[in-house]
Image (cartoon, rainbow, N blue to C red):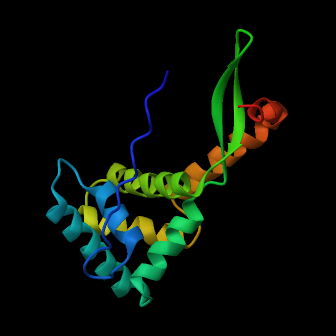
Amino acid sequence: MRRRRPEKRSINPDPKFNDLQVSKFMNYLLVGGKKGIAEKILYDAFDIVKEKSSKDPVDVFKKALNNAAPHVEVKSKRIGGATYQVPIEVPNRRQFYLAAHWIIDSAKKKSGSPMSSRLAGELLSASNNEGNAIKKKEDTHRMAEANKAFAHFGRGR
């Protein structure tokens, strides 16, 4: 028998923009529990975004996350000795999680400049529907589209 699911922790909105998504993104960004550094990186990235695009950085941030969020993904399901890639719809919480991680990972992969400027560049390109995070989303959608024939396996959980 499975144990009970852990209760969802509530997180506080970030102090500067009073936004829950910004706070959550910051938590995904932090490494080794160093929240102060993650905060500085994100706020510096927002300053760079504001400087480059002269738009509200939180709007750019939300648009980038919206654009990078996948609507369907594939999940491996074993049926009768064979493993199928079954396309399933992505819940909203997971959409945010995946989009945030794809943006952060693509910023981490670039080298040469400080993390804040790499993150700012990635946020700007994702808000314009380009960049590695968007490419990752399109690949995920393409894979789900290719395996649409197995969609009927995903219904009866």
Which quadrant of the structure image shows residue 30? bottom left
Q: Is residue 78 left or right of residue 19?
A: right
Q: Residue at x 39, y 50 (%)?
A: 105
Q: Nearer the viewer, residue 119 or 66?
A: 66
Q: Nearer the viewer, residue 58 or 105?
A: 58
Q: Nearer the viewer, residue 8 or 76?
A: 8
Q: Is residue 85 above or below residue 139?
A: above
Q: Residue at x 45, y 73 (%)?
A: 61
Q: Residue 50, image x and y in percent?
A: 36, 85
Q: Nearer the viewer, residue 36 or 13?
A: 13
Q: Residue 110, image x and y in percent?
A: 35, 53
- Count of numbered circles on the image: 0
Outermost residue toward the bottom? 54
Q: Is residue 16 above or below residue 135?
A: below
Which quadrant of the structure image shows residue 87? top right
Q: Is residue 53 left or right of residue 81?
A: left
Locate the C terminus and report the quarter of the image it occupies.
top right
Q: Residue at x 53, y 74 (%)?
A: 63
Q: Is residue 144 above or below residue 50?
A: above
Q: Residue 72, image x and y in percent?
A: 68, 48
